[in-house]
Amino acid sequence: MSKLQAFEPYLRKWQAEPDGEPISTPSSCLLPVTVDGRAGMIKLARPIEEQLGGAVMEWWGGYGAAPVYARDPQTGALLMARAMGSKHLLRMALSGADDEATQIVCQTIAQLHEKRIEPGPKGLYSLDRSFESLAPMAVREGDLLATCHAIATELLSSQRERVVLHGDAHHSNILDFSERGWLAIDPKGVIGERYYDYVNVLCNPDLPTCVEPARFERQLDLVCTHAKLHRTRLLQWVMAHAGLSAAWFLEDGEREKADTELLVARLAKSQLGLD
């Protein structure tokens, strides 16, 4: 079977040419292409939330997110611009430019949250659904995870400033598009409180420094300043998300990664004065 077989209908439909090898992720198949001389990427998403994310990308219209050149509404297949810049926010955060990376993340999220003329795509699901894994794991583990679940329950029942969220706005989902600037990819098709999109600056499991108390406090202050967020409520959302992320890792049998996320939850808990 050809590695390009799944992409062939879209290569023909969109008159695109392969420009690299297919890439497989847990949720999607991707193929670098060129179309009308432009660098593009075809994305074939498997889970429904990833397909909904494609509708969100199209709705964002290239403002704060990668431009969408074409989308198949039946399958959710997406043809979008491909990031060709050389910078990466995760590398910046680990090589002395953490503050700059945080500012870029905040600026990008703010663009995504700006009100559009057209209403958001239909069928987006509530943020509550994203937290379904936390309750059973909180019962099993108790202790800090139970506290995270209690805080998450309160936050989810009292959401404010609800927007179409990115849902996974970490350092590797905001890319360098050269002259277009920094743009987001891979949203999840979620509606909820805008605070939630900022938590991954502090909770990103791919960022080893996220468990350092001094780094945590500094980036917390920067996010609150740039995004105009209330410190206490952001800390609560950090605890909620860190608990959720730990629950996901525990579901996958990755106890060490779960413990790292719980270290972030402990930092937030300490800042909240709950120790």
Image: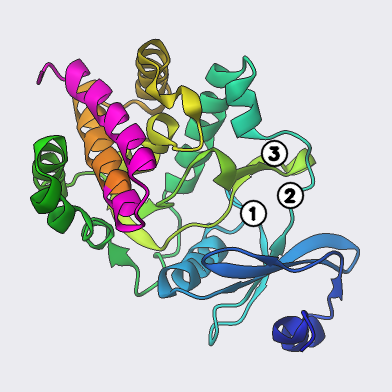
Q: Is residue 250 magenta?
A: yes
Q: Which residue is mark 2?
A: 83
Which element type, helix, strand or loop, lies under badge 3?
loop
Q: Is residue 4 left or right of residue 65?
A: right
Residue at 40% in and 63% down: 189
Residue at 10% in and 42% down: 146
The residue closer to the viewer here, 96 or 256, is 256
What residue span does the magenta drawing correspond to?
Answer: 247-275
Amino acid type, mark 3 = Gly
Residue at 40% in and 52% down: 167
Q: Position of residue 236 (x, y in %)?
A: 20, 32
Q: Which residue is mark 3?
A: 181
Q: Can residue 114 be seen here?
A: no
Q: Is residue 18 left or right of residue 194?
A: right
From this view, report whether residue 13 is shown above or below residue 100. below
CB contact under 8 Å: marks 3 and 2? no
Q: Tell me the mark number nearer the camera, choosing from 2 and 1.
A: 2
Badge 1 crowding class, 10 Å Cα cut-off, few under 14, some 14 to 19, many 20 or more, is many
Q: CA distance from mark 2 to mark 1?
A: 8 Å
From this view, report whether residue 198 is shown above or below residue 188. above
Q: Which residue is mark 1?
A: 66
